[in-house]
Image (spheres, rainbow, N blue to C red):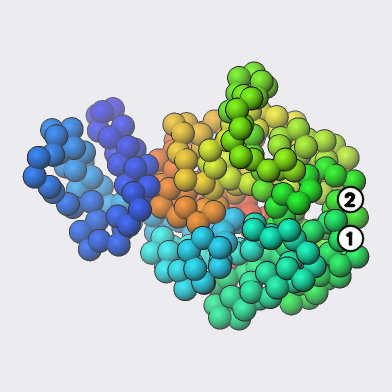
Amino acid sequence: MSNLINRRKFVTGTALSAAGILMSDRVLGMHHAGETSDASVTESVASKYNLMKDVMKYRKLDSHVHAHLFDGGPEGNIAFADRLGIDKMFVSLPAYHGVGTPQEFRSFNDLMLKCMKQYPDRLIGQFTANAIYQKESIEEIKRCVDLGMVGLKVYTQLKINDPLFYPIIEKMIDLKMIIHMHAYTQLGLGGYRMKYDTGIRPNTSIPEDFVNIAKRYPEAMFQYAHIGGGGDWEYACKSFVHYPNIYVDTSGSNNPENMIDSAMKLLGEDRLFFGSDNCYYQSVGKILASNLTENQKKKVFFDNYNEILKKSGRNVD
């Protein structure tokens, strides 16, 4: 029986991670000549497991997803959302390629506003800004909030604990909205970071930066992006244990074994958000394949992020 359960978990976690597998009308029902006996056993178990029933039974809010960045316009987002039962996506377009001038971040926010107008019941924008331009950023935050956007999504122009960010953080505290920051930590051991060049931008925020700013502003809310993005997620989660105003989203294409379970054990059941970062199958599959209880899965997929939205009166019914 235990082998059957383990194989079911394997199928759940890996089937969704295979790009395009859900586009087939024969989901998990494929057979190819020359398969190994293990593959045949896995297929047999999979045929008895209604994966899509499991996928669709949970309401989902995608707290970390982009439009006009990785896979085209909002039509692509909605196609994945429909396929995977995602109620609403919180889309953003930070200054990923540009330097983040006021002209750039206003234009990026305008694109997200167009997405919202195109799919008003499905897409909600997270605005972006660049704290180097404090006056323009404050003005842009007000404009975007007035137009229905929620939460700040920022990239690597400044670290999250740079003093230039302080006025922006204070504005977000007043708005009771979360600050969602791109983040990364190189792999290491016991806090030691490897010395190889990974091409990470020098102003990328790391766990120590989040801890520093969380101490300074305990009333602020910070979202550490994509623990499934390939960095040292375990080190990050351990760093955040005693800082309840730091949340993590589970997005990213990487699915290390026990990542979701370990993050839950370290941070508790209220501080994990479902997100995809446009890695849709993997991000749903890793939660389904975890050992979380039904209630915990519901909280990660929907309730936890909705509780954040509720603070500013922008929650989903």
Question: What is the three-letter code of the residue carrying label 2?
Answer: Leu
Q: Secondary structure at mark 2?
A: helix
Residue at mark 1: 134
Q: Quadrant of residue 132?
A: bottom right
- Residue at image x 46%, y 34%? 256
Which mark, by number, is residue 290? none
From the viewer's side, name the closer residue of 268 and 284: 284
* N-terminal-most mark, 2 or 1: 1
- Residue at image x 20%, y 59%? 26
Question: What is the three-letter code of the residue carrying label 1?
Answer: Gln
Which mark, by number, is residue 164? 2
For mark 1, does the 10 Å Cα neighbourhood hold few (<14), some (14 to 19), or many (20 or more) residues?
Answer: some
From the viewer's side, name the closer residue of 307 and 228: 228
Residue 96: x %, y % from top left:
65, 57
Query: Going by the picture, which residue comes out furthest to the left?
Result: 33
Horizontally, residue 249 falls left or right of residue 99, namely: left
